[in-house]
Amino acid sequence: MSTIFIAHRGESLDAPENTLASVRLAWARNADAVEIDIHMTADRKIAVIHDSNTRRTSGKYLKVKEQTLTELKKLNVGKYNGRTWPEEKIPSLEEVLDTVPAGRMLFIEIKCGPEIIDELYSAVNRSRLSPGQVKIIGFNLKTISSAKNIFTGCEVFWLKNIDKNYFQFWKPGIDEIISTSIKNKLNGLDVKYSKSVDERFVGFVRKAGLKLYVWTVNDPQVAGELIKLNVDGITSDNQLLLKEKLGII
């Protein structure tokens, strides 16, 4: 197995997150996959945005769920890192789905509740992507379990923060996390990187037959250690830089 590299909200170190600019830059830099975030709008469309409101990315406070997609698209979300992409608007999920090249994958993080799942399923089905190209991720167990029941052909992963206390026991217990994942027929875990993601932890996950992805890793040394642990994928704000530093390209 080889570890894949996933562009976090697109290639978000060099372009505005969750925009077509960052997504297309990731594909141009040969990312294996792109991760995006989604919310449902007032007119039951799917907007690609991380936060539940638009203040951080546009400078104007609007709640995503209270606006139509058309209203959201009036905002400019292209100001980032001292530069401005004047044409960058909040994309729809369909716009992002249309960018995915053959053989690449899209990780879709559900940031709201299960009310979005039916429309998400319809949007993915309308796209030209195969089930293997779409991965569903989320923190809310009820939401991702509901997604797994509908997305029978797609892999679904539980986002978790993993940590140990001073007595070296995982909080929450790794046995509980794994048993809950298996009970809900999830395909694996997508965990935030910490020193707890070590050989022992990876061994627990692998023994259970689950896949393991890790986010958000921007340190080449950490990425190299995770590759040695044979994790399935690493999510990064600049996956190209990691691969260059590691001599992968």
Image: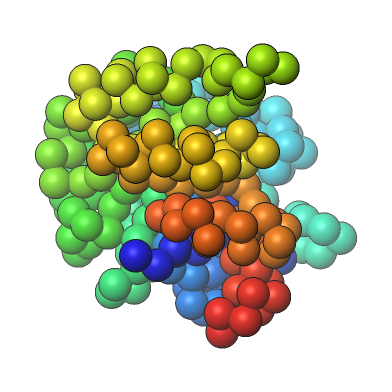
Nearer to us in this view, 90 or 244: 244
* Quarter of the N terminus within the rendering: bottom left
Quarter of image, res 119: top left
Residue at 52% from the left image edge and 44% from the top image edge: 199
Q: Which residue ends up furthest to the bottom in the rendered image?
A: 249
The reply to whether residue 45 is visible in this rendering is: no
Residue at 62% from the left image edge and 63% from the top image edge: 224
Give the colouring mode of the picture: rainbow
Quarter of image, res 41: top left
Residue at 82% from the left image edge and 58% from the top image edge: 81
Residue 37 coordinates in the image, percent (x, y): 49, 41
Residue at 50% from the left image edge and 22% from the top image edge: 66
Nearer to us in this view, 189 or 240: 189
Quarter of image, res 122: top left
Residue 213 coordinates in the image, percent (x, y): 45, 47
Nearer to us in this view, 5 or 60: 5
Q: How many marks?
A: 0
Nearer to us in this view, 44 or 51: 51
* Quarter of the C terminus within the rendering: bottom right
Q: Left of 171 or right of it: where is 189?
A: left
Residue 118 coordinates in the image, percent (x, y): 21, 31
The reply to whether residue 42 is visible in this rendering is: yes
Residue 157 coordinates in the image, percent (x, y): 35, 37
Vertical position of residue 154 compared to residue 100: above or below: above
Q: Left of 236 or right of it: where is 155?
A: left
Vertical position of residue 154 compared to residue 68: above or below: below
Q: Which residue ends up furthest to the right in the rendered image?
A: 82
